[in-house]
Image (tube, rainbow, N blue to C red):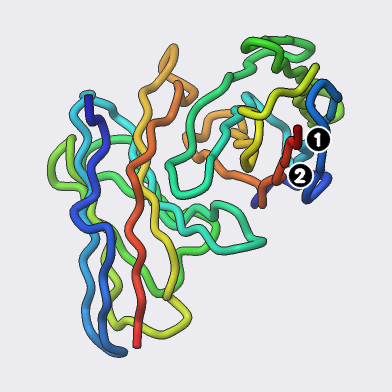
Amino acid sequence: QQPVQSPQAVILREGEDAVINCSSSKALYSVHWYRQKHGEAPVFLMILLKGGEQKGHDKISASFNEKKQQSSLYLTASQLSYSGTYFCGTESRNDYKLSFGAGTTVTVRA
Amino acid sequence: DVKVTQSSRYLVKRTGEKVFLECVQDMDHENMFWYRQDPGLGLRLIYFSYDVKMKEKGDIPEGYSVSREKKERFSLILESASTNQTSMYLCASSNKNFGVVNTEAFFGQGTRLTVV
């Protein structure tokens, strides 16, 4: 079952912040985050393995609330290069199945 | 530097044809996946494989089958193509981490399949 992402789309000006949420109806073992630019393959950003773990990639960070079966991706002081579609991928315990959400399209404008 | 290669970027097939989509990875990864990507629906998992000759259904397996005879190759088969299978198909691979979870997944460039 696909995780649910919100919002579907967000438009930002350079320097603004945004949060993308990802939730699952199943208990999660890990959460992946990827970014896909137009016409390209999705590219890995980070993986979170433990409840409460936060990771960062440049000014992009994420948290994982295992109890709530949720993860959030934080875009801080957004840059033009942050534009793209962000996908969360989730894995349940003892299952190699990696399911992705519908994506969140981020547009950063000058 | 190419890691996951899909055999075709674009394919046009007729309704009812048997279609093979091939994917090869050169990273010795154990896990391989097939997704289809449609606007507004994101990446939907069709099938995955965590070992040679092993296959598991994903979220939307109907109308598809897969084959993994060698570790580096994972094939997606449309037994009888239909117009509703027109889509972008993405292959991905990853490794096991501590024997349990997926590590970073690498994606191929995708195959745009049109069924007419």
Image coordinates for residue B21, horizontal then vertical, percent: 24, 60
Image coordinates for residue A11, horizontal then vertical, percent: 81, 42
- Contact between labelled residues 1 and 2, with CB atoms less than 8 Å apart: yes
Total label count? 2
Image coordinates for residue A66, horizontal then vertical, percent: 78, 22
If you read the primary sequence from the N terminus, does the residue marked by circle 2 or circle 1 appear first? 2
Q: Is residue B107 above or below residue A8?
A: above
Q: Quadrant of residue A56?
A: top right
Q: Chain of mark 1?
A: A
Three-letter amino acid code of the residue under disc 1: Asn
Q: Quadrant of the N terminus of chain B?
A: top left
Name the residue rendered at 73%, 33% in the picture. Answer: A27
Using the image as rendered, state which of residue B76 and residue A95 is in the foreground.
B76
Q: Residues within 10 Å of mark 2 (few under 14, many from 20)?
A: many
Q: Quadrant of residue B93?
A: top left
Image coordinates for residue B2, horizontal then vertical, percent: 23, 30
Q: What's the mark number on residue A11?
A: none
Q: Is residue B88 left or right of residue A15?
A: left
Q: Is residue B57 left or right of residue A82?
A: left
Kindly tell me whether residue B96 is visible in this rendering.
Answer: yes
- Name the residue that disc number 2 marks: A5
SS category of the residue bearing label 1: strand
